Amino acid sequence: MKRLDGKVALITGGGTGIGAACARIFAQEGATVVITGRRKDVLEAVVREIEKAKGRALAVAGSVTDEAHAQAVVAQAARSYGKLDILVNNAGALAFGKLLHETDEAAWNEMLAINLTGTYRMIKAAVPEMIKAGGGSIVNVSSIASLVGIPMLAAYSASKGGMDALTRCVAMDYAPQKIRCNSVCPGLVDTPMASGLINNKDALAQLLTAYPLGRPGTSEEVAKLILYLASDESAWMTGSVIPIDGGMTAH
């Protein structure tokens, strides 16, 4: 048996980076995958790739900042495939380069709306379906910025810190319903979101001095950790906040 045989998974931000890597590996492991994000063409390209490999996937375009979309995409997953077992809250936005007093309210509110309130909306929509299914696994994609202080990242860090606190509360609230909730906290990962830094050789070299393993991570490496948390192999894990960062937070 594959590790996610018979499971139905919903992944936000599923068109690129870590979300797309999760969609591919989940499908390879037997899950039916529903991916959502703002760019329909990008989502559909991932679906075609999965279907070419004989997997099952569905793309539903929309934003986690829209309450109606959160409710609708969960309802569509359950209606199309009969249930919902797994939710990966991967949709996110990054803003860096400003001190707190230089960060206007619009930028602050955007970070909270996407990274934190978007996660709340998706969990709120998904939990009733998971209760119907007899349990489930929620994995929130946070950041090492929630664990250590990183300059010029106040709004982003606050949103991810809130996500980790939310993870623990959801884990406590829904353990009786057999719904688990965990966070993963990636360090620097080679994704489109980080491309500006990855492609700046001097800045990248300086940053990697803080990483004992000396390189950025890959989306696939993070997706494998998320796969473990989504699967029944991690059945005794809930409320955990796990760094995956090449050792960056170990010192």
Image (cartoon, rainbow, N blue to C red):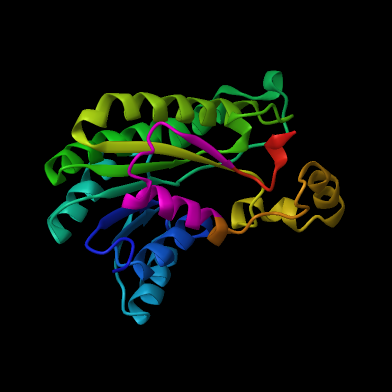
Rendered position, 146 above or below 125: above
Between 46 and 66, the one lying in front of the other is 46
Looking at the image, which residue is at 37% across and 73% down? 50
Please indicate whether residue 60 sits to the left or right of residue 107 in the image: left
Please indicate whether residue 8 sits to the left or right of residue 182 in the image: left
Give x and y (percent) for residue 167: 40, 30
Looking at the image, which residue is at 12% across and 56% down? 82
The quadrant of the rendering that contains the C terminus is top right
Q: Residue furthest top?
A: 101
Between 114 and 207, the one lying in front of the other is 207
The quadrant of the rendering that contains the N terminus is bottom left
Magenta highlight on residue 82: no
In the rendered image, which quarter is residue 51 located in?
bottom left
Residue 36 in sight:
yes
Please indicate whether residue 56 sits to the left or right of residue 76 in the image: right
Looking at the image, which residue is at 17% across and 37% down? 128
Between 36 and 1, the one lying in front of the other is 1
Rendered position, 235 above or below 173: below
Give x and y (percent) for residue 211: 76, 45
Looking at the image, which residue is at 67% across and 31% down? 153
Give x and y (percent) for residue 136: 25, 44
The tally of labels here is: 0
Magenta highlight on residue 239: yes
In the rendered image, which quarter is residue 135 located in?
top left
Residue 15 in sight:
no
Please indicate whether residue 43 sits to the left or right of residue 132 in the image: right
Give x and y (percent) for residue 92: 50, 43
Which region of the structure is painted magenta? 222-243
